Image (cartoon, rainbow, N blue to C red):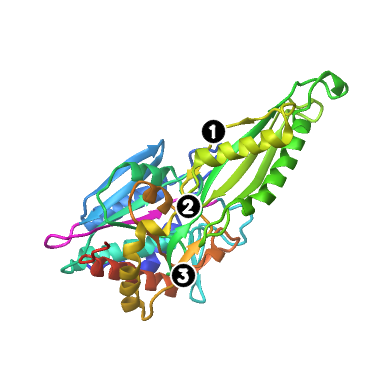
Amino acid sequence: MPAPTVLPLLCDLVALPSVNPMGRTVPDAPPFFEGRVSDYLEAFFRDLGVPFERRTVSPGRDNLIARYEPPGRPRRTLLWDAHQDTVPVEGMTIEPFLPSVEGGRVYGRGACDVKGGMASMLAAFARLVRERPAGSCRVLLACTVDEEYTHTGSSALADQGLAVDLAIVAEPTMLDVVTAHKGAVRWKVITEGVACHSSRPQDGVNAIYRMAPVLASLERFAARLPGLRTDPILGPPSLSVGRIEGGQSVNVVPDWCAIDLDRRVIPGEDVDGVRSELRQALEADLGPEHSFAFSEPWVRMPSLSPQCSRGWVEPVRSALADALGSPPREAAVPYGTDAGPLAAAGIPALVLGPGDIAQAHTKDEWIEVDQLERAVEAYYAVALRLNEVDPS
């Protein structure tokens, strides 16, 4: 039986809704959560006849890991990683789960981020299984959950202690080899007040008013932050306030207010350090009369340093040059990926995949068919060429 080709695989995946609720309370039904994709992947791996496991990360959300064992005794084991979830679909101008192929592009939610990369990995993996080329690496193909919000899938994968030499994470890099990216920490800042009837606001304490000086102080700190430190590749860290909520009703003085912070971290920074730094800056700026509280972070995405994969970059670029006709660029990106938790667990990790990040999360998301097909050749070439590499 011939190996499945990438275009039908991508169309199948796009047609299976796997929307990440992004922290919202939603029904466990379409289009939310990854279960439909997980079931498809389980059937795919069963049909290939490869060993695999399906591990629950949280209720209804399962990682899958399939294993390709080549002939002989492989020296190297690769981990390929692609996430199953997509961002929500509000505001899209195309049918998100009705894949269409027009003008050399595949349209649909997740076509670019990152079901295109997953389809290319699946096609390359199936080709390895069917052809069983001599001298290739062992390949573990991981399909993870919850990348778009809290990265619980990749964190659970990293905690398994897999014995792998190099991880390749699928994201839309235009097949450039990404060796570095920023991380992210997200948490809430909370102010409290005393509720009362809005006709007598003097009887209460307005928590939203209490948040106002905190917001002003955060804006001042965010403006200073790029001057405090920088990374020679990724540039400075950043801070952004992305959401505010508070109160019960317009006719009740609010007794609570909360804002969501997004703090992008660079190599050398850690979660506890950046939170402590910000708390001290706010306390020094506002003084003891302005009280606030920090929640625990719900995102702890490590950054990716190029040092973790240094010995693998040129062998990967060389393999891709042979497969694609020219060597890809080595690049750095500002967004986070599943490579962060894997690298933090001691696994050398690179990010490589088809598509342009400019098309990810868009109202008419698409990916070029040519990029998908080239990615299949790229992943296959990496599996063939890296078995004898000594990264030291």
Quick check: 249 above or below 237? Answer: above
Disc 3 to disc 2, C-alpha distance = 24 Å
Numbered marks: total: 3
Q: Which residues are magenta?
A: 69-87
Name the quarter where the N terminus is drawn.
bottom left
Q: Are marks 1 and 2 in contact (CB under 8 Å)?
A: no
Q: As rendered, which of 134 and 391 lies closer to the eye?
A: 391
- Residue drawn at 60 percent across, 60 percent down: 363
Name the amino acid type tagged 2.
Answer: Pro
Identify residue for label 2. Answer: 267
Name the amino acid type tagged 1.
Answer: Glu
Instruction: Specify the quadrant of the image occupied by residue 2.
Output: bottom left
Q: State which mark lies toward you, 1 or 3.
A: 1
On screen, residue 229 versus residue 202, left or right, reads left
Identify residue for label 1. Answer: 296
Element at badge 1? loop
Is-magenta flag for residue 150?
no
Identify residue for label 3. Answer: 174
Q: Earlier in the sequence, mark 1 or mark 2?
A: 2
Instruction: Specify the quadrant of the image occupied by residue 69.
Output: bottom left
User: Outermost residue toward the top?
Assistant: 203
Disc 1 to disc 2, C-alpha distance = 21 Å
Element at badge 3? loop
Disc 1 to disc 3, C-alpha distance = 36 Å
Name the amino acid type tagged 3.
Answer: Met
Instruction: Specify the quadrant of the image occupied by residue 167.
Output: bottom left
Question: Is residue 313 among what the camera can see?
Answer: yes
- Residue drawn at 61 percent across, 51 percent down: 228
- Residue drawn at 61 percent across, 58 percent down: 92
On screen, residue 154 versus residue 250, left or right, reads left
**How many residues crowd mark 3 within 10 Å: few (<14), some (14–19), many (20+)?**
some
